[in-house]
Image: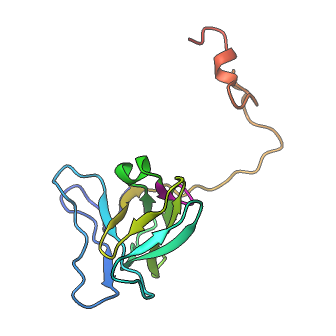
């Protein structure tokens, strides 16, 4: 799945451009961390007391970085932070996908699903960045599938109805 930019002995290199001088670059918190926490670094002006995200409001917030993966076998995903999610702050699109050829700012669309305003501050951890392997496929157009499965066209909840299902 990996090419010359990805092997078992070396971590893949992802180009990162900080958008602000003196920005502390994001890193893994521990050796076992699967994700990198990203912080709020808005491009527009925020008051020193922060920005109050109102209930039901969506706000696009820059993380202060631009990345270029430059490897079609890798994609990046923005995911919500569990602690913020329990307080009502989630990503508006649930998960954000960053393609390998994107070079723009990494922006999180934050959504306040709670009944109370949520304070956002510059430098606050707002989401997580995870890199995952990707397989690009080629479709083979068919009039019908070459074989029929037990599930067939059964969708939502259909596996509960299959014989022997628990």
- Nearest the camera: 89 or 28? 89
In the displayed structure, would residue 136 be above or below residue 45?
A: above
In the displayed structure, would residue 116 be above or below residue 157?
A: below
- Nearest the camera: 2 or 19? 19
Residue 147, image x and y in percent? 72, 29
Rendered residue at 22%/66% (across/down):
27
Could you tell me which quadrant the C terminus lies in?
Answer: top right
Report if residue 7 lies within the magenta region. Answer: no
Q: Residue furthest right?
A: 143
Examine the rendering and report whether any part of residue 108 can be seen. no
Q: Residue furthest top?
A: 164
In the displayed structure, would residue 141 be above or below residue 23?
A: above
Residue 35, image x and y in percent? 31, 56
- Asked which colour scheme the image uses, the reply is rainbow
Rendered residue at 53%/55% (across/down):
94
Examine the rendering and report whether any part of residue 125 can be seen. yes
Left or right: 54 with respect to 69?
right
Residue 56, image x and y in percent? 59, 60
The range drawn in magenta is 89-94
Q: Which quadrant holds residue 20?
A: bottom left
Could you tell me which quadrant the N terminus lies in?
Answer: bottom left
């Amino acid at each position: 799945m990996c090419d010359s930019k990805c092997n078992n002995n070396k971590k893949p290199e992802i180009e990162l451009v900080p958008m602000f001088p003196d920005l502390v670059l994001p890193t893994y918190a521990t050796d076992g961390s699967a994700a990198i926490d990203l912080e709020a670094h808005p491009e527009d002006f925020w008051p020193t007391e922060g920005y109050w995200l109102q209930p039901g409001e969506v706000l696009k917030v820059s993380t202060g970085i631009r990345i270029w993966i430059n490897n079609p076998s890798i994609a990046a995903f923005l995911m919500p932070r569990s602690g913020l999610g329990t307080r009502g702050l989630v990503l508006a699109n649930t998960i954000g996908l960053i393609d390998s050829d994107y070079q723009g700012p990494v922006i999180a669309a934050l959504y306040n699903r709670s009944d109370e305003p949520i304070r956002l501050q510059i430098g606050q951890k707002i989401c997580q960045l995870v890199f995952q392997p990707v397989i690009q496929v080629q479709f083979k157009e068919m009039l019908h599938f070459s074989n029929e499965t037990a599930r067939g066209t059964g969708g939502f909840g259909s596996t509960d109805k299959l014989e022997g299902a628990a």
